[in-house]
Amino acid sequence: MSAVIIDGFQIAADVRHQVAEKTAELVKTGVHPCLAVILVGENPASVSYVTGKEKALAEVGMKDRSIRLPESTSEEELLKIIDELNADESVHGILVQLPLPKHINEDKVIMAIKPEKDVDGFHPVNVGNLVIGRKAFLPCTPHGIIVLLETMGIKTDGAHAVVVGRSNIVGKPVSLLLTRRETNATVTICHTGTKDLASITRQADILVAAVGRPKTITADMIKPGAAVIDVGVNRIPDATKKSGFRLVGDVDFENAKEVASYITPVPKGVGPMTIAMLMQNVLEAAQIAAEAK
Ligand code: GUN
């Protein structure tokens, strides 16, 4: 039997709808949630992500303080802009789209964002709070994955989750979220140093692929009945498309869906959830700022 295709597009729309309602309530109290999105350069994937974020802000009724900077922007200039946004009370969240041009130190930039406005959840203060179970802004893609699992009623308690990939944006934080007491999965993290990857992925009740390489996970690497979450967003050439490319994940979707019980498609799986959870974080940042007034 073919797997249930998880409709991340619809689930994300439902989350945005709830965020829009709460945003409207907050606006009535005189606080209008506002996100500053900073894009340096014109990396096509980043331009597309940032455009998606701007569209979502408009849809949920939030203010959008978009800042597009040329590739030649210096680290100093970028840090100065972040300082100004940190001090601006009308801005509740600051997001610097990654990756940054090579001449800018990404760590320094992430560290410059005030943790209270770090709606990406990338600042070491938020990462540390997540590790020790204190309140923190949760990173958007990992949080979106947890919401997909919850919404679909996929049992995580006692499940063996295998995460392939150890990035700071997805692999590491999703592993932490999966092991939290309320999720209660047992997690194995695999990476480029893992020997016999297939023997480990085949043990997964929940398999999260966050590698950034097409067809890394093939059908024979999946345990029958597993839930497969594909975080990959890879552009591959496709002459039949106007853009000249199409998006594929890290999983060989067509064959994998015949083995798995649940699977996320690419696009319209995890991707829309990232933006929906970002909107939720901006709302939360604005609510906290409103309470502190
Ligand atoms: N680049 C890829 N994913 C993300 C993300 O979630 N946030 C930011 N800021 N940059 C990214």
Image (cartoon, helix red, strand yellow):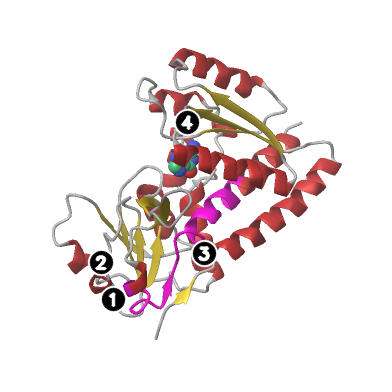
Tell me how far mark 1 sits from mark 4, CA to CA.
40 Å
Q: Quadrant of residue 178?
A: bottom left
Crowding near the residue tagged with mark 3, few <14, some 14–19, many ≥20 C-alpha atoms within 10 Å: many
Tell me how far mark 3 sits from mark 1, CA to CA.
20 Å
Give the labeled residue for mark 1: 223
Question: Farthest residue toward the bottom?
Answer: 1
Tell me how far mark 3 sits from mark 2, CA to CA.
20 Å
- Residue 70 percent coordinates (x, y): 50, 21
Tell me how far mark 4 sits from mark 2, CA to CA.
36 Å
- Residue 171 percent coordinates (x, y): 35, 50
Give the labeled residue for mark 4: 42
Above or below 119: residue 89: above
Tell me how far mark 4 sits from mark 3, CA to CA.
31 Å
Give the labeled residue for mark 2: 201
- Residue 263 percent coordinates (x, y): 42, 70
Residue positioned 35% across, 51% down in the render: 237
Give the labeled residue for mark 3: 148
Q: Nearer the viewer, mark 4 or mark 3?
A: 4
